[in-house]
Image (tube, rainbow, N blue to C red):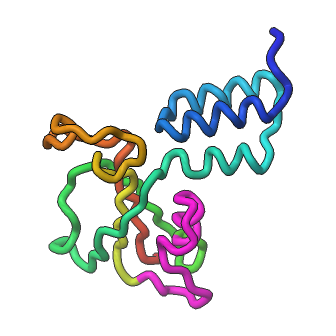
Amino acid sequence: EDLPQDVRIYNSVLKQARAIGALDILFATLDIMAVAGVNGDDATFDAISTAAARSVRFVTGAVSAATLPPISMPEAVFIGRSNVGKSSLINMLTNRRSAAFTSKRPGKTQQFNFFEINGDTPENIKGLPSSEPLRSSKWRPRGRFYLVDVPGL
């Protein structure tokens, strides 16, 4: 197996995969890097950090079951003790500094905070041609889900 050893080649593929939202290509490239024994660098981690979360939008802060958003997509929920970094983890995973509010004081998250990930519409995705079929109700962005920040236990 004669695989390239230059991390820049892989970074280029990762950036292109991220740009088109091809997570399968992104993960395959990371697998090939592992087989080739190529370690990622800062550019590698930059390329993959925003691949899964192309857009982030705060949806609601729910304080009771009645105020939860409708079950319309998968959810990834972060549950843990107070002040362990759940909100910071959400910010890191989405590559945003302030998607989820963080504080040095424990117990700051007081509600179930729902963030819609990859809820792009055809009208606001850069480079996607605008056309009537894409505006139909059948449009479903790839990888759309909720990240949920839960109050500390």
Total of numbered circles in the picture?
0
Residue situated in front as seen by the camera: 18 or 82? 18
**Residue 139 higher or lower than 56, as above or below:** above
Determine the residue positioned at 16% across, 38% down: 132
Looking at the rendered image, the quarter that the N terminus falls into is top right
Left or right: where 133 falls relative to 92: left
Residue found at the very far bottom of the displayed protein: 105
Please identify the quarter of the rendering in which residue 109 is found. Answer: bottom left
Q: Position of residue 68 (x, y in %)?
A: 22, 68
- Residue 92 part of the magenta-drawn span: yes
Left or right: where 118 falls relative to 23: left
Magenta span: chief secondary structure: loop
Please identify the quarter of the rendering in which residue 95 is found. Answer: bottom right
Q: Position of residue 75 (x, y in %)?
A: 35, 53
**Residue 62 higher or lower than 125, as above or below:** below
Report the magenta residues as a range.
87-109
Residue situated in front as seen by the camera: 112 or 122? 122
Please identify the quarter of the rendering in which residue 40 is found. Answer: top right
- Residue 82 part of the magenta-drawn span: no
**Residue 9 higher or lower than 42, as above or below:** above
Determine the residue positioned at 17% across, 35% down: 133
Task: State whether residue 119 appears in this view.
Answer: no
Determine the residue positioned at 50% across, 46% down: 52
Q: Position of residue 83 (x, y in %)?
A: 58, 79
Determine the residue positioned at 27% across, 75% down: 62
Task: State whether residue 20 appears in this view.
Answer: yes
